[in-house]
Image (cartoon, coloured by chain):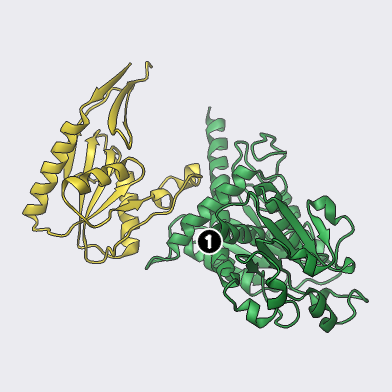
Amino acid sequence: MTAQLDINQLLDELETGLRRILEERNVTEPAVIGIRTGGVWLADVLSKRLGIDQAFGELDISFYRDDFSRIGLNPKVKPSSLPFDTEGRDIILIDDVIMSGRTIRAAMNEIFDYGRPASIILATLIDLGARELPIQPDVAGRVLSLDAHQRVKLRGPDPLRIELQETGQ
Amino acid sequence: MTAHDPSPHHLQLTRDGQLRHFLTLDGLDRDLLTDILDTADSFIEVGERTIKKVPLLRGRTVVNLFFESSTRTRSTFELAAKRLSADVLNLDISTSATSKGESLSDTLLNLEAMASDMFVVRHSQSGAPHFIAESVTPGVAIINAGDGRHAHPTQAMLDMLTIRQHKQRFDGLKVAIVGDVLHSRVARSQIRALNVLGAEEVRVIAPGTLLPKDVESLGCTVEYDMEKGMKDLDVVIMLRLQKERMEGALLPSEREFYRLYGLNREKLALAHPECIVMHPGPINRGVEIESAVADGPQSVILNQVTNGIAIRMAVMSMAMGGQVAERQQKAERAKA
């Protein structure tokens, strides 16, 4: 069985939340970075919604994952691409789902290797809880708590949709 | 045997087809070679950052074990390991002619006692890295940095990366390898890689005295006349004339060789106008290549050096990854 969450509703939440934080922090020229793959689709959509003309960056965190010593290298790694200087910039970091927090840790380590940003705002479409590290999103489209047999997945890029799957276990 | 052959006897690959040593291109299929090139592409991007380092091999020790001297290969392996955050030990060991086998085993035992995670091996004897891979402690990865006349797989792969960057494909490409094929481990690995990746034609151009007897069986055509051989080429790879390995009367003279097989502007003009010129280095200007060609607009010789770092980072991280994944799987099976 596959259920769907309304993607537009979640994107509205993200957009509103991000506008509020940018205003609170007085950030006028943020640079957007999406984490592959889902985060990159969202970076595209949110850049347009927020009216950010600066091209967004794409991050592949394979070289920074903390499980290399258990599973080795992801064979399908693609080059990261940041078309702007991160030094001194206010960054909006976007991913589709946050759970353990390990992906975000890896992404922040990678971003710092390009230069020291002024700040990072973390936005995730879905927050599944189950954190293993002290990392929290500044904005989440929806907080969900899944049963052990449920999985959530962002599909895209066109159309962008969220699938809630029952694995039947 | 393919990369995904589950046979435990395949020395270079884990059960699920991941690289765990990198000794030769033999037995590695197109998918795996493409994975290496794709991974190297990502490392090229790392080399353009302010901080050119990723944490993949942090806390691991890489030993560059060079029984034969080399500047470029050793320094690019060293830089590659450092950019992967590994600790690097460089050992230049000249072999005594009489006791190579014995000294190799002893050296290995000592280095293993230092808890090394990877050996990068260059040796004048064909098969030395293979021998080490067979006898080394499980979990230690071996990378071949050139063995005798046998293979130089990282050089061949960095050449493939350079070709793909400039031509975006291998299908339909006509590639020539010119010069001293007889003494060249690079040529053997290149012919193999080009065939696996699907080049249309691999041509070797050389005098008969500088070709191995079985050269066509490697997967190439042979041309003795360079002017004929240059026709329609997309890529020309010049080999270094290995003066130090020339024994007996293989060549009349260097001048004669340059006249017949040296790449000058006139001969290059016979190839496709967008033909790229490659050379594994070090180049002998005026012996196998004219300076104006080596430094000319069609030369990609310095790109090859840059790509060498990225390819070595790819191979080292993939082999180390295969070793750790394999160790983890074994531990899990033991628990179950």
Q: The chain drawn yellow is chain what?
A: A
Q: Which residue is drawn at 62% across and 70% down?
A: B74
Is residue A93 toward the left or the right of residue B87 in the image?
A: left
Q: Position of residue B84 (x, y in %)?
A: 48, 60
Chain letter for mark 1: B
Q: Where is residue B92 in the image (x, y as percent from the top left)?
A: 68, 73
Considering only vertical position in the picture, is A128 above or below B229? Answer: above
Residue at x 42%, y 49% (from the top left corner): A62
Q: Residues within 10 Å of mark 1 (few under 14, many from 20)?
A: many
- B106 vs A66, left or right, is right
In the image, taking residue B140 as reference, residue B231 lies left or right, namely right
Chain letter corresponding to the colour green: B
A110 sits to left or right of B325: left
> Residue B171: percent from the left, percent from the top?
63, 49
Q: Name the residue under label 1.
A: B310
Residue B264 seen from this side = no
